[in-house]
Amino acid sequence: MRKPQIIPEPVSLSLSEEAPFILKSGTVLHASDKEAESAARYFKDYLAKYYGLSVQIVAANATVNDGILLIIAPQQSQPEGAYRIKVQPDQILLEGANPQGLFYAVQTLIQLIPVRPYTGGQTHSQLPIPALIIDDYPRFAYRGLHLDVVRHIFPVEYIKRYIDYIALHKMNYFHWHLTDDQGWRMESKKHPALNLHCAYRDGSIIGIFPGTGMDSTRYGGYYTIEEMKEVVSYAAERHITVIPEIDIPGHSMAILAAYPQFSTTPDIPKKPATTWGIYNRQNNVLIPSEEVFAFLKDVFEELMEIFPSPYIHLGGDECAKKWWKESSVSQEFIKTHGLKDENELQAYFVHFVSGVISDKGRTAIGWNEIMQGGAPQGAIIMIWQDTKAGIEAAKSGHQTIMTPLDYCYMNISQLKEEKTVLAHEGYTPIEAVYKFDPVPENISVEVEAKVMGGQICMWTEYYSSTEHIEYAVFPRLGAAAEVFWTPKAKRDLPFFLEKIERQKERYKLWGINYCDVRE
């Protein structure tokens, strides 16, 4: 009997010799309570969308003997997100340790359904599901997917679709990168100039940096407060937390377009950047002033009114210290505040914003550069440069999220000779993503406990269309999902690559564009 091909691979799966359960129009979904009904409704909608099947949801207790029974059965011994599936000829039992676990059970059940309606001697409306028992739970608490909507912006309906991809892979965090040098994508009521002057750039670089020229097409936009709340609500229904990011005190060129007085060179006009990777080429850092700190308090408080996430990302990466070194105002601030150098000035900004965040009962996340000059106590460090920085952060007592460039950045090509899309230099095949582990070898149990999990990042400098986004993300998202969910001892690269071939059929069913890495 062929083993079901599920991504991410479950902790435990036992096949039975019994006949399969036949899923068909008229199958009844028995939801044990309102939260179970939410999971049942998701499954009902999925069947209607992709298979044209109509099923019924009814309230019932655990004694029902036919159909599909969805139960939330809290157990203190079970980790967050744990679930059990038991498939018998006359019944499927989906049991979650909590609502999130039950939702994950539904995601696994979706992958047990034949990708296309079964035609082997049965009607198109009958889908066999093999008899089995699955017990499963995630390895890591944090399993994230990121999207940069600054370099290129995408409509709300696509953001929802992107969130669906997260859900279908049992991931639970959406990191939404909302500001950078090239634009400000969040509506601000307190500072409308951000949307008037910062949401649009004059054009975009043509080709791979340094490019072959510049187009003259005005580009940009921003998400309204109502739209962002809509995204948050949509994600919450799928047990996904949206983590927003306002990137400061570097990567602030767009802010400076509206507020040139926030720059260390206020007399030089600024505009949102039309190219990528500014860093030392243009002045994009904030000056330390009371007006700037009041502004930061305003916008982060606005952000937290929209996003209920326990985590708020403040960026903190790639601060070009040269601009502070050349600024007499910055140097005077360093002196009067007893700071050693520009690293500690960067830390001053990070500590200030982290305090604004913690005052609202939230926790700050920053890229690993916030360790320079000393990260705020309790801040979570998101590692992008290398895993050594993650070990350093964990050893210093910080929780860490691993997303190292060499394994987790999807804007790097997954083909050696990429001809379909532009991409950053480098090569990150699906095998490299799969072999990555968020927990480095030979670290202590105490340090390992600080690793919350991992994330893959989709930066969009060279990805202006949704088709290209999907081409970059798939099928590597499947590899990351299995790395973040499945016990290390259960991972099997040859079997995973076999599963990806099957998953491609599901991509077609879902209407996803993907890179055919084994064609």
Image (cartoon, rainbow, N blue to C red):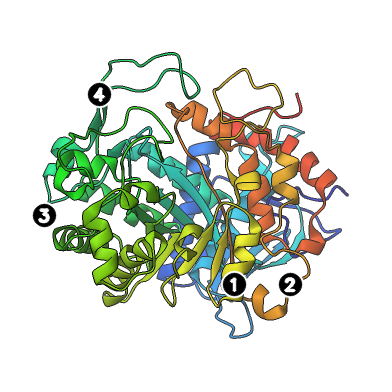
Q: Quadrant of residue 341?
A: bottom left
For marks 1 and 4, the one nearer the N-term is: 4
Q: Tag 1: residue type?
A: Ala
Determine the CA span between mark 3 and mark 1: 37 Å
**Viewer can see residue 13:** no
Task: Report whether 121 appears left or right of 263.
Answer: right
Among the two numbered marks 3 and 2 on one chain, the one whose residue lies closer to the N terminus: 3
Among numbered discs 1 and 2, the one appearing first in the sequence: 1
Q: Are marks 1 and 2 in contact (CB under 8 Å)?
A: yes
Left or right, 357 with respect to 414, comes to left
Query: Residue flagged by tag 2: what amino acid is it?
Result: Ile
Tell me, for residue 202, which label it has, or none.
Answer: 4
Quadrant in the picture for residue 499: top right
Who is closer to the viewer here, 27 or 325?
325
Q: Is residue 51 left or right of residue 38?
A: right
Identify residue for label 2: 443
Residue at (17, 43) in percent of width and height: 266
Residue 398 is at least partly visible in this image: yes
Name the residue beneath numbered marker 3. 190
Q: Which element carries disc 4, helix, strand or loop?
A: loop
Secondary-structure class at tag 1 = helix
* Image height of 50 relative to 453, above or below: above
Q: Which residue is mark 1?
A: 394
